[in-house]
Amino acid sequence: MSMVNLSAIAWNIRGLGQKEKSRAVKNLVATKKPRIVFLQETKLPKISLAIQRRLSGKLLQGFCFAPAEGSAGGLLSMWDEN
């Protein structure tokens, strides 16, 4: 039996459009190397592949999102596909 080191981050980011917050996510992912990240309240209408890669580098390849409605909501999930 092999053991898997599973780590996850869940964060109500309250707006991912600000550089400080996206930088904080990027630094946290780089430091903690989680297998799953779930961000709530991104407040972004769209998350592109470029934004996802900027946040997670090559560590987390998979992602899906639900857009914000107006200035509320928005979800982003990212995960390690390995």
Image: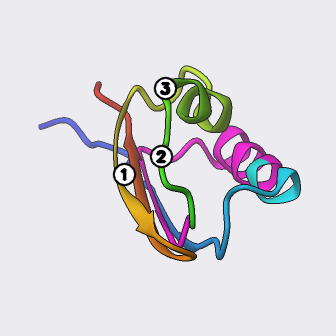
Q: What is the C-alpha distance between the residues marked 3 and 2?
A: 10 Å
Provide the residue span drawn in magenta: 23-42
Q: Residues within 10 Å of mark 3 (few under 14, many from 20)?
A: few
Q: Residues within 10 Å of mark 2 (few under 14, many from 20)?
A: some
Quarter that holds the C terminus: top left
Q: Secondary structure at mark 3?
A: helix
Q: What is the C-alpha distance between the residues marked 2 and 1?
A: 28 Å
Does label 2 or label 1 sit earlier along the sequence? 1
Residue that badge 3 annotates: 49
Quarter where residue 81 is shown = top left
Residue that badge 2 annotates: 46
Q: Is residue 72 above or below residue 3?
A: below
Judge whether residue 24 is colored magenta: yes
Q: Name the mark on residue 6.
A: 1
Residue 5 place in picture, x, y as percent: 38, 46
> How many labels, in total?
3
Left or right, 33 with reference to 18: left
Please name the residue shown 88% across and 56% down the image: 20
Quarter where residue 44 is shown = bottom right
Residue 31 place in picture, x, y as percent: 73, 44
Does label 1 or label 3 sit earlier along the sequence? 1
Q: What is the C-alpha distance between the residues marked 1 and 3?
A: 24 Å
Quarter that holds the N terminus: top left
Asked whether the beta carbons under mark 3 and mark 2 sit within 8 Å of each other, the answer is: no
Please name the residue shown 47% across and 46% down the image: 46
Q: Is residue 55 above or below residue 15?
A: above
Q: Nearer the viewer, residue 50 or 71?
A: 71
